[in-house]
Amino acid sequence: MSLENNLSFEILYEDGYRLGKVNLDDHIENTPYILLNNKDYFQFGSMTIEKPLSYLVAETYKRGKYDLSTVPLVQIPFDLPIKEAKKLSSLNISIIKEEKGDCLPIYLTKYREINQELFESIPKKSIYFFKRIADERILLDFYFRLKEKYPSSIFFIDSKNYEIPIFLFLGFDLFLAEENNERFFSEYLSNPLPELVEMYSNGSVNSRRLLRILYKEFYNSFEVHLRREFKRSYYIDDISLDRPQVVRWRKEVEQYYTIPTNIVLLLPCSAKKPYRVSKSHTKIISFLRDILKDKYSNLSQLILTSPLGVVPRELEDYADYDIPVTGHWNQEELDSLSGLLCSLLNKCNNPVVIAHFGENSPYLKALETLPFEIQYTQGSLEELKSILDANRVLWDKEPLNEYKTKAQKMFSFQFKKEFDLPFNYVERRKTTDLTFNKKIIGIFQNKIKVNVIGGELIKDSLWVNIDFDLRGDIFSKGIISNSENIRPGDDVIVQKNNKCIGVGEAVVSGDMMKKLNRGKVVKIRAR
């Protein structure tokens, strides 16, 4: 972003928290950053930022000259009566229209209509200073909307202690060096994982409330800034059930996965991942292969678990996680699981559902409310064989190709579009290849990474469109159009004249790609 002082901000990486580079007249600093607090200014590395000053004293106060100036406004107490709050907010709006400055304080009230008038009057600035107000809903709503409007701006919050990891996770860039802020700041950035945020949220009532409201009420605003990655995750707290990445898994399995056959086996999860290498799943898979022979893939398998809910056998490579197993499930976990399972089974035509759980299994409670007839094995392999024999007509027919079905479901899930192409999945000693008509179109390493040949086959899934010769990474100014369902970390297809000319990894979401003033939006892997 370029203002009077030629300041620019570039997002280098985003996963809720964002790593950025600030450039002011060739002085470069990285964000997030802890500001040093001086009398009249903040020290941002080699840069100085004027502190927010009250408009009521600005004319008489001797203001220093700093690298970045701040518009002086009237600070409005959050719970001021509406009549007084409206007068002061109107005064601030008139000041904003007249005063120049690189930075702007944001003074919110408890009145949404006043806040909306303020929002509509806010111009593009280098830095916005937020105060940690008592109403988290008002704060989060205003922040996400302003960030969507001006994604190339920098955001400051005067939060403290246990809330620092949460506001970092939210994408705030600047904080104050006071109390224990530096400790929490450093600990989070050294290991920026959601489970650490959830752990720190237990530090105070306010921090826990903040995170719970974020998870429960701001999924749509927050999820677009989270990487779609499938690395190992830890779910150690009840609040993990509402973690946006977990909610996204359930939503995307429901939307992009279809059970391939109408005879479905429900199985418990295992501690070892992927499930198929665990002792319990190795045993059941071996048993099923002995019974079904080459018709093994005609029996669909769904693994039930918490907090993800349901993991289809074909997608188990994406589900790498660990949880404390106690055998106790709360009602919210059961409802989440049964809701997703019901949605998947509703896509089937008269499904025959087999539940392979012991008679005291906690999973059984999640099945009680399902509107389907379910046949139970009580954990007995003999009973499972009996049920399969009784339903032989459903599976003893032309076999599905196991690995082609797996590859097809993986492509559909990862690239957000159901494909009906004969992809194949070939496990080798050190790699897993993905093929089409015997040609390698990509590899699997925690996620599918296609090459240009593979990109051409799925070019209308997650894509960006350019009109220049591709020689390196793509910057925001080079994007003509793109699919909006791209998330940071996604593999994306680069198109020119409706042809795939490269593939790479998204730095930011599709919605932000064209809104940014500068910076890379796709890191090219192959062309």
Image (tube, rainbow, N blue to C red):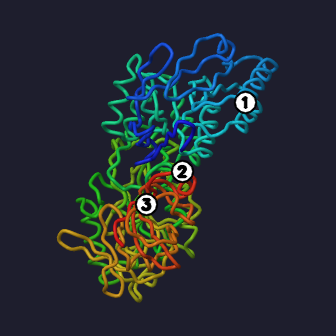
Question: Could you tell me residue 404's position as x and y percent?
Answer: 37, 80
Relative placement, left or right, of 353 versus 217 is left
Residue ID at (40%, 31%): 33
Q: Eyeballing the image, is 79 above or below 215?
A: above
Residue at disc 3, secondary structure: strand
Q: Quadrant of the N terminus?
A: top right
Foreground disc of the pair 1, 3: 1
Q: Residue at x 68, y 28 (%)?
A: 99
Mark 2 vs mark 1: in front: 1
Q: Position of 178 compared to 144: left or right?
A: left
Mark yes or no: residue 203 visible: no
**Helix, strand or loop for disc 1:** helix
Which residue does the numbered mark 2 point to in the structure image?
517
Q: Residues within 10 Å of mark 2 (few under 14, many from 20)?
A: some
Residue 115 position within the rendered picture, expressed as x and y whole percent measured from the top left = 72, 32
The image quarter in which residue 313 lies: bottom left
